[in-house]
Amino acid sequence: MEVWRPSVFLLASLIALSAISCAEELLPTEPEGAYLIWRQALLEGNADVAYDHLDEQTRAVFEERVEVLNVMSEDILRYLPRTDQRLARQQTGAVLLKEKGIEDGRGLFKVLFKPEAMKVTPEIEVGTEVSSVEINETGDEAAIVVYAGQQFLLRKEEDGIWRITSWRTLSLERTQWILDNRDALEQTVQDLINEEKEEMDAVIKYLLDEEARRRKAAEEQKK
């Protein structure tokens, strides 16, 4: 007799549907509920919800990087020759502000992480389901382990919502290029300022020398 066995895809689909149902019922005031909402946002490509469930310090990383991009954009306009500004904006990444309409950390997160581009497979759906939850003694930090073996850390913030802290390091790594480009631009600007100062010093020296020669010539004529 043939025995019917559910396929892996069907099992994954059932688990995913169950997760969606749980995410709708559970509130982020519990670690597992917060994780499930965040997980489902990633699987569905909902960048706004995914960003909202990152902890305050992680979101601050993106806000600070946008501020750096804005400062670089202003410095490029202020210090660099007009002929070099377009290339400088491309090389530093400041061009993203206009091209992608980035106004805040949320906008930068959407551009860099692109959760809508995640390829969801049955293995990912099953592997990211919650296997265990541990909460510390003070009740403000939690560790969730999924079936794939990964661990996700969460922290309960002042508003009573649990948010993901595990992406803090990843966010720093994925945005380090902005700081590197800032440092490079600052060096370029400083070099330009130094060059302008040297040119100005040379002009002033020339004018002073000319004035000295003029006075000397005038004194010799009096004699």
Image (spheres, rainbow, N blue to C red):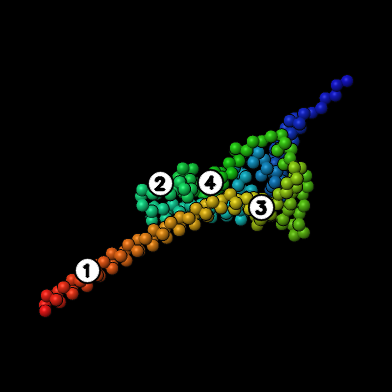
Judged from the image, the secondary structure of the residue bearing numbered disc 1 is helix
Single out the mark in the foreground, 2 or 1: 1
On the image, numbered disc 3 is attached to which residue?
A: 165
Earlier residue among tags 1 and 3: 3
Residue 102 percent across, percent down from the top left: 49, 46
Q: Nearer the viewer, residue 186 or 12?
A: 186
Give the quarter of the figure containing the N terminus: top right
Q: Within 10 angstroms of label 1, few (less than 14), some, or many (20 or more) residues?
A: few
On the image, numbered disc 1 is attached to which residue?
A: 210
Residue type, numbered disc 1: Glu
Circles 3 and 2: CB distance less than 8 Å? Answer: no
Q: CA distance from mark 4 to mark 1?
A: 57 Å
Q: Within 10 angstroms of label 2, few (less than 14), some, or many (20 or more) residues?
A: some
Q: CA distance from mark 4 to mark 3?
A: 19 Å
Judged from the image, the secondary structure of the residue bearing numbered disc 2 is helix
Q: Nearer the viewer, residue 86 or 199?
A: 199
Earlier residue among tags 2 and 1: 2
Q: CA distance from mark 4 to mark 2?
A: 22 Å
As drawn, the label of residue 86 is 2
Q: Is residue 181 visible?
A: yes
On the image, numbered disc 4 is attached to which residue?
A: 107
Earlier residue among tags 4 and 3: 4
Judged from the image, the secondary structure of the residue bearing numbered disc 4 is helix
